[in-house]
Image (tube, grey):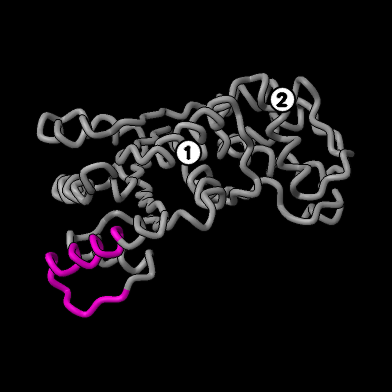
Amino acid sequence: MYQQYFGLEQNPFNVTADPNFLFFSRRHQEAFSQLLYGIKERKGFLAITGEIGTGKTTLCRALLNSLGENTKTALILNPSLSKLELLQTILQDFGISWQNNSTLSLLNILYKFLLKQLSLGNNVVLIIDEAQNLRMHLLEQIRLLSNLETEKEKLLQIVLVGQPQLRQKLERPSLRQLRQRIIVRYHILGLDQDEIAGYIKHRLNVAGSNGRIKFTEQALDEIYRYTQGTPRLINIVCDKALLAGYVYQNKIIDQEMLKECIQELEGNTN
């Protein structure tokens, strides 16, 4: 509704995981670098955690886009599967066909695929999003996948991505063997207060802003107080603020406008 008024080519504050809009805060840059290191060095197991809305999925999609042709990837978005369904989904995402649906057969097919990729000089990465929802028997299945290796190389790099509950789940004594195999771990926090302005400016620029949209310093402070630096919440409140700017025909977003938007989001309209 407000895009034409502000001269934008697209909505700058969608909450979808679009890697084109990824803003590399200090913590997101650190997480990205750790993931790249773990994958390129064939470390096997990696784990990235963070609160809801901190940009984990967006970071993973950006990672997938940056790995290049010599890295084959699979992304599992819904881990609520059976053991057989998990293997089938992995093979499907790697573009592997099969006929026999037995677990042993699917594992053999995957192992042959991994060996072939190694012979071609390729790396293979499996990313499992929302991994905190993995049931215990699936986590054990995933641990067994890490056994697909040669004497010198990990054939499959597995990235577990999830909310803080994933860290809690991995601390269970029954998952000790899996926990010990996770070489790279990183927990993503929200943006620092001094990163809020850069985040908003970045998303506006990607959306085609001509620089005329301004958020006052007081408005930025209000955004941080409300969101505590959580990117998804920043998007929601900024989207609301631009709609308010359109309604009031004002391209300067000030503190009072932000307070009004936050009240509406919280259902306090009286």
**Residue 57 point in image, percent of width and height:** 47, 46
Is 269 displayed left or right of 107 in the figure? right
Give the quadrant of the C terminus.
Answer: top right
Give the quadrant of the N terminus.
Answer: bottom right
What type is the residue that disc 2 sits on? Leu
What type is the residue that disc 1 sits on? Leu
| Quarter of the view holding residue 81 | bottom left
Q: Range of the magenta residues? A: 97-115
Element marked by disc 2: helix
- Local packing at callout 2 (Cα closer than 10 Å; few below 14, some 14-19, many 20+) is many
Q: Which mark is residue 36?
A: 1
Q: Is residue 104 magenta?
A: yes
Element marked by disc 1: helix
- According to the image, label 2 marks what residue? 220
**Residue 34 point in image, percent of width and height:** 45, 32
Rendered residue at 52%/39% (across/down): 55
Rendered residue at 83%/45% (across/down): 209
- Local packing at callout 1 (Cα closer than 10 Å; few below 14, some 14-19, many 20+) is some
Q: Which mark is residue 84?
A: none
